[in-house]
Image: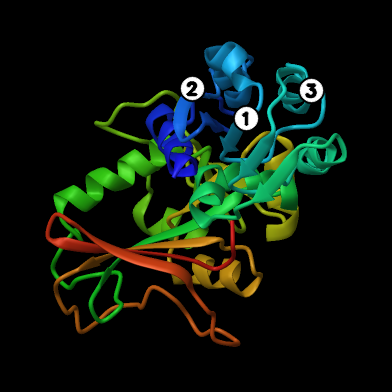
Amino acid sequence: MSLDRALALVDAAGPVAYPNPTVGAVLVVDGAIVGEGATEPYGGRHGEVVALAAAGDWARGATLFVTMEPCAHHGRTPPCVDAILAAGVARVVAGCLDPSPEAAGGLERLRAAGVEVELDDRFAARRQNEAWRTWKSLARPFVVYKAAITLDGRVTVPGGRWVTGEASRRQVHELRAAFDAVAVGMGTVRADAPRLDARDVPVVRQPRRLAFGRGPLPPGSELELRSGSLDEELAALAAEGVQSLLLEGGPTLATAFLEAGLVDKLLLFVAPLLSGAGPHFLGGLSAPRELLHATTRAVGEDLLVEAYLREP
């Protein structure tokens, strides 16, 4: 399907439009692609406009497949809805709605103007801009809890420094490089004095490094102390432009975030060993939590379990 092609364009482009979302678009006439594109780097054209320019006159009467509902407001660029109507596109199929209050409503505007519209709501489309979607719709960062654990759910191995292997540890540094902020609790700060920076991987910008809890921070610590309530601190971080937050804390911090309903996704790097002792990665929860879209894949000798606590 051409929506699959539009999704692939976003995957290939990556987060080039950060802090805005990246959108892919494909124009089709009689089953043939006549134009396609993805959002250009920040301040550039949206994916729909790139595809329309590539198609030229072929856009008239075409079907536009787009990974997210075309925007209906004038930001750094004019509304994509206006460009679509001017080009004479006959049908628009969107992979998800725009959660932004100021830009949403594009499909309704197109429908009112006589364009045939269809919402093919897909997890794959929502996932591509999951941090931005949460930041826009909930006014807080998208929160991912990451832990390295043994098969019996422990976060330490007696007599060992590392729980997981080198491939998993490298991927954690890649994750840090992709997030706006990384955080631990004060218990982890006092026990391990973590740096929380991304090392030995390509880095466009280092994440902000945070410690949640009561201070003071140890002398020489380069972390930011966040001592307010979790809701208040996440709202403040969102207001400062933090769209994504990676939690690397111990069970106390993880349980607090989960109990507050503030974890969006879990990433568990599971090592093929039994510890037999030490703390578990979670404390007691007041109720079970249903996990969505759970997947697993090998990372070196370890297994990465990924699952969502809510739809992105």
Q: CA distance from mark 1 to mark 2?
A: 26 Å
Q: Quadrant of residue 309?
A: bottom right
Q: CA distance from mark 1 to mark 3?
A: 19 Å
Amino acid carrying mark 2 in the image: Val
Q: Secondary structure at mark 1?
A: loop
Mark 3 burial class by Cα count in 10 Å: few <14, some 14-19, many 20+? some
Q: Secondary structure at mark 2?
A: strand
The total of numbered circles placed on residues is 3
Q: Which residue is mark 1?
A: 20
The label number, if any, that marks residue 82 in the structure image: 3
Q: CA distance from mark 2 to mark 3?
A: 20 Å
Q: Mark 1 or mark 2, which has the lower sequence index?
A: 1
Counting from the top left corner in percent of width and height, residue 265 is at 49, 61
Counting from the top left corner in percent of width and height, residue 192 is at 35, 54
Q: Is residue 23 left or right of residue 135?
A: left
Counting from the top left corner in percent of width and height, residue 45 is at 62, 16
Front residue of 48/102: it is 48
Front residue of 290/71: it is 71
Q: Is residue 236 above or below residue 88?
A: below
Q: Which residue is mark 2?
A: 34
In what quadrant of the picture does the N terminus appear?
top left
Q: Quadrant of residue 212?
A: bottom right
